[in-house]
Amino acid sequence: MRTLVRYGAVGLVNTAVGYGTILALQLGAGWAPVAANAAGYAVGLAVSYVLNRRFTFASSRPHGETLAPFLGAAALSYTLNLVTLHFASQQLQWAPAAAQLLAVFSYNVSFYCLSRWFVFRSPQ
């Protein structure tokens, strides 16, 4: 349970940092919205990697063993997010807010599981 709480806390921090970066670049530095969004997500992903590696999962595995799988897990989870969003909104015809909520849930559950049991697992 402690790991789940830490994972949630890291998610809040990386979301705040990523969103703050987006706003700073777009509103403060005049970046185009898509460029600011991409940069904000990259910063948020970097924060997520560092905090989840050290704080959530306390991994001692080298960066060379965890960084690529972390990025792969993020990409796979995001793909699941998009598939879930499409299915809930198009096939099930859920309201947009409900479809987004299910998609966010699918991302977080899959990313947590992949991070815990694949990316940051203890060395054998």
Image (cartoon, grey):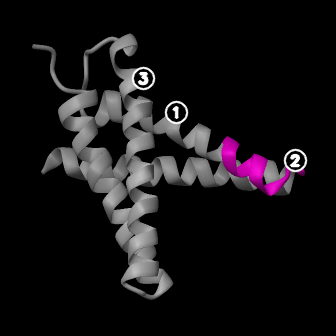
Left or right of 16? Residue 29 is: right
Q: Is residue 109 above or below residue 123?
A: below
Distance (Cα) linking label 3 and label 1: 12 Å
Q: Residue furthest front?
A: 91
**Residue at image x 25%, y 23%?**
59
Q: Which residue is mark 2?
A: 29
Mark 2 or 1, nearer chain start: 2
Do labels 2 and 3 touch, CB within 8 Å? no
Which is more toward the observer, 23 or 93? 93
**Disc 3 versus disc 1: nearer the observer:** 3
Q: Which residue is mark 3?
A: 68
Q: Amino acid at mark 3?
A: Ala
**Neighbourhood count class around disc 3 (C-alpha, 10 Å): few under 14, some 14–19, many 20 upward:** few
Q: Amino acid at mark 2?
A: Ala
Magenta residues span 29-39
Mark 3 or 1, nearer chain start: 1
**Residue at image x 44%, y 51%?**
79
35 falls in the magenta region: yes
Residue 76 percent location from the top left of the image? 39, 43
110 falls in the magenta region: no
Q: Is residue 89 above or below residue 70?
A: below
Which is more toward the observer, 6 or 61? 61
Left or right of 103? Residue 118 is: left
Secondary structure, mark 1, is helix
| Residue 108 placement: quadrant | bottom left
**Neighbourhood count class around disc 1 (C-alpha, 10 Å): few under 14, some 14–19, many 20 upward:** some
Q: Which residue is mark 1?
A: 46
Residue 45 percent location from the top left of the image? 51, 39
Do labels 3 and 1 touch, CB within 8 Å? no
